[in-house]
Amino acid sequence: MSVPHDAIGAEYPGFFKRLSVTDWLWAALVTVSTVFVLAVFGQYMDIYQVITLIVHAILGVWLGWYWKPFRAYAVAVGLLSVLGVLSYGDSLARAETNFFLKYLVSGQSAVMWMCALLFMSTAAYIAYLFRRDASGTAGVMPAMVTAAGTGLLGGMLLWLGQAGIVPGLEWVSPLAFLVAVGALTGPLSRTEFSAQVGGALAWVAATFGLVGLFVRWRETYLHDPAWGYIPVSNLWEVFVLFCVVTVLMYLYYERRSRNRGMGGFVLLLVSGAVAFLLFYTLDRQAHEVQPLVPALNSWWMKVHVPANFIGYGGFAIAAMLGVAYLMRARGERLRPDGLLARRLPGRQVLDDVMYKSIAIGFAFFTIATVLGAMWAAEAWGGYWSWDPKEVWALIVWLNYAAWLHMRFTKGWRGVPMAWWAIVGLLLTTFAFVGVNMFLGGLHSYGAL
Amino acid sequence: MNRSSQDSASPRHPSRLSILVSFLGSMNLAITLLVILAVASVVGTVLEQNQPFQNYLMNFGPFWHELFRTLNLYNVYAAGWFLFVLAFLVVSTAVCIYRTTPTMLRDMRNFRLNVREKSLRSFAHNVQSETHPEPPAQVLERAGNVLGARGYRVRQVEQADGTRLLSAMRGSGNRLGYFFTHGAIVIICVGGLIDGRVPLMLAEMTGNLVLETREIPASQVPEQSRLGPSNPSFRGSVEIPEGHSATVAFITIRDGYVVQDLPFRIEVKDFRVERHETGQERAFESDLVIHDDELDEPLARTISVNEPLIHRGYAIYQASFRDGGSFLNLNLHHLARGARDPLPLDTRVYGNHVQELTDGSRYTFEFTDLQTHNIGTVVDADGNAERRDMGPSLDYTIRDPSGSGMFFRAMKNPMERDGTRFVLTGVRHSTAEPFQYLYMPKDPGGDGVDRFMRMVSFLNDDQQVADVVADVATSAARQFQGTQGEVPLEVVETIMIRLMDLFVQGGYDAIVADIEQRAPQQQWESLMDLFGRVVNMTLREVYMRVLAEEGIESMTGVEAAYLDDALVALDALPHFGSDFLITFNDFEHVQASGLMITKAPGQNVVYFGSLMLIVGVFLMLYMSHRRCWLMVRPAGQGSQLVFAGTSNRNMLEFDEEFDTLSRHVLGQESPGDTTGHARESSENDPR
């Protein structure tokens, strides 16, 4: 039947009309919080800080509208951070006596929670990949073989490390054990249950990670008001930031692509960062708050570093999806009915999310590099000095620019792009930590 | 359309210019150039830049050194070929923009109303209906409204056979993204070249500028090595001691420099290092005064790291600091007989002192650096590491008559170890080694090491040592009797004098070495025990006499503890490696502030380019150029139609958008209820 002519409402509701009551409640909450902060603390803030706060509020409202789960996350982070800050009062010593601080929300405890939860989340996501088939038990055998293999590998890494044969390997062994645990427990379920658990754990972990950074921010002032700095200034702090940013970006793409199969891969890489954090904390005591060196005492750090880590997070996700892509492609080629070909996300989904994470990573890496140049102009006397860090940032940028070019102009897809994304992450890692370790230069703030 | 026919005709008669243009604008060339630049840049980060040639020669050997030097790899970012490749890349990108822009603009404006039905039917996104119930006009009107409401721009045309075509597009800004990003690359590089060293290199090549390599005052640098204030861009530096001023900056080029004259005078009133309570640096600040004829009164401003001063386009940065020739008050001890009578020295950092000995040999003391703070990590008894400030230190070099030097570091403040306070002096044979420290116990009642120096002096006085030996010999002889039977007193004394001599020359180690050289092995242990006791008895007596000079008659616990520490130090003293020791009494700090002075007129060009780049990247990545066509012709009561669409980005999103659009356009659903139509993307999608 044809629809009567006049009954057709052609108008597509505008952006604001599409917002629900919850959306407006969210906007109201952010607005009220911002006004509250301005009313109570406005007298201590200069004009730049007021503008920064308002810009953040606007971004927060927009992000909450655009990505609904962000709202619950932001509220949880806010409440826990406030709990941490209030529990401290003005005495750092309460970290040892106050229950909440000692076990939950001091900068250090919260980050340790994040580490533990990320490990668990990784195992759960991997378990999802090894879930039992809806009918039959075809997947159980490979799962057990994987569990045995990775368990053995983990044991060997642990032994090699602890016996001092290859010192440091013991810190890598958790990654193998996580895969083993995932493969072992995966076949217990037939449903999406373990992936849902993994997702929930990842959300809570990201909450604790950000709370840890916020409370630590306060702690830097409690150590000495003259120290106070935003905790994105040393290697330990930026690794926490990396975990939080990467997990959040992953969760966004998980929801958007409606595919939980990528979690095992992305979270495994994040677990690698967690393993490093644990080593850095337990072996090197790098978590202790130290005052900033004068070169880092700048407003620019607050924008330059986070922008960079959105870039790194995007590149990391893309590389791990590249790994998944290669495994899936190989599985389809060799054993089309095998676990790899059936369980890993579809190639089109992987390709698409890989492109999206490189795109967002590239966009923010561009911003970060430009911000870095502007900061360099203020701190080092020139926006570009061919410092090793600058040169390697340029190489990373060119690498991903070339990746995008090839995709746009030559239509490259598939296996070569997956390999390229992996190589890209190696370059990025070198630019991120390798330059500081091996090449030095003006930008060597993190040391092992 | 004319344009495209020209384009298709041109390959048949390619002019030289068009060949050149297509070569320059080709992506392959651009990629080749980029790879060359990337590799060269990496080489520049791996190969430490701008080191003295001597270092490279030692590291790589003559062959590779010569090759690297010829390729200019030691200063690769200023190498002619590097800049040439960079310039070539700019030209290539510019040509690429020139070639592509017309197509881009056409693409943004053109609604492609000449699209063929056949191609529409072959689009990946298309919906076809041979028997749509509504008449064409109704479908077209609704389609126009639906697409318009979604932000599409819409055009309609009626073709000769009565077929009507509606074309819509959205997000053509994506094409601007191309223009913005590529244009930004050109703008940034041009800005960078303005601020780069190209003009200096040209001036040097044409001989208008000659590098100065001598260490001479700036005022004596000849005109051919100077740059006037009209020089549009440079990056130089200058060190100004507190209370002094400068009107020039130095631009370092390879192994030389040129002098950049400034149109104003910079005075450094004061330089400060602000510190945290732990002693770590918090801020470096200079109080500057700019004296400029163009100013009504001098401009006073404090600069610090991250907070430069910008005056008339010149940016002045806090870049470094060093000692500006601090005043020093020292004591020079000659570790022989003169140790108790030190020579007071009043000198300055960077100053020299020449000491002539009685035998005519001349030793030169060079005072090289003063540090006011030395932050080190101290581990206490509980194993807690704590960062602590060890106080001021003075670095000096002693050159013997042959000119070879030993390097020393005198700490001003005593350091506490296990409850005792020591005065420390470090020594090393080359600047690459860490310091080995001599721990001299501090006088119990004062700040100096006078008592220790008196002991050193005493031990170096043969007459006094003989005196002491004569006193101690009788009781020492009893020790000898225990193991060796009767030993004449003269023999005991001779042995003791010899032992003391060995101790002064080489510590306990020398005595041990002497025993091992002279005695049979079975006696070593007993002799070491015996000689050790005898030496300690003698030293104890020496100590008692030194105490007596201070008016102390009996040894209490404090004095006994001092003796233990003093013996350790005396044992180490022969390994100190110098006959001289300097104690660091006091200083008056004078610092020099290291300023970097730059003029970078290209900076705003670069920033503009950067902004363009960011905008362009977002346009390119997050705006997709989408097109939809609706081709309708009457068929009976209703119509026959094709609805097709395409997007140049984000195909998966467009899948959903097209799905919704097509249903709305065909009237299968009204746009009000938009929920629940997201297509489940299959997990096992075979594509």
Image (spheres, coloured by chain):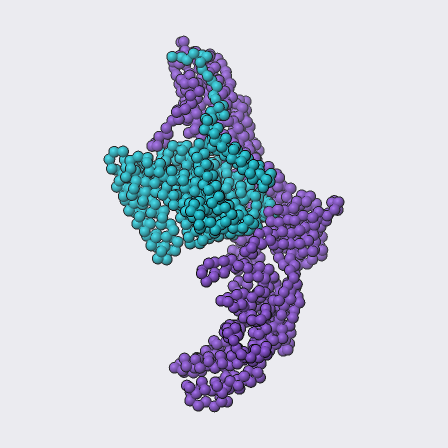
Chain colours: A cyan, B purple
Q: Count of labels shown? A: 0
Q: Is residue A412 left or right of residue A32?
A: left
Residue B314 seen in this snapshot: yes
Question: Which residue occupies 38% across, 37% down?
Answer: A199
Q: Is residue A82 left or right of residue B404?
A: left
Q: Give the image location of residue A282, x and y in percent.
A: 42, 52
Residue B112 seen in this snapshot: no
For the N terminus of chain A, the image quarter is top left
Question: Which residue occupies 56% across, 55% down?
Answer: B277
Q: Nearer the viewer, residue B450 or A34?
A: A34
Question: Which residue occupies 43% across, 80% down?
Answer: B529
Q: Quadrant of residue B409?
A: bottom right
Task: Say if B361 sits above or below A111 in the image.
Answer: below
Question: Which residue occupies 40% across, 81% down?
Answer: B521
Q: Is residue B529 left or right of residue B556?
A: left
Q: Give the image location of residue B426, x and y in percent.
A: 54, 66
Q: Quadrant of residue A163?
A: bottom left
Q: Give the image location of residue A139, x and y in percent.
A: 27, 38
Residue pushed farthest top? B637
Task: Say if A331 sits above or below B207 in the image.
Answer: above
Residue pushed farthest left? A136
Q: Nearer the viewer, residue B31 or B232?
A: B232
Q: Give the image location of residue A236, x and y in percent.
A: 46, 48
Task: Say if B643 sits above or below B637 in the image.
Answer: below
Q: Quadrant of residue B275?
A: bottom right
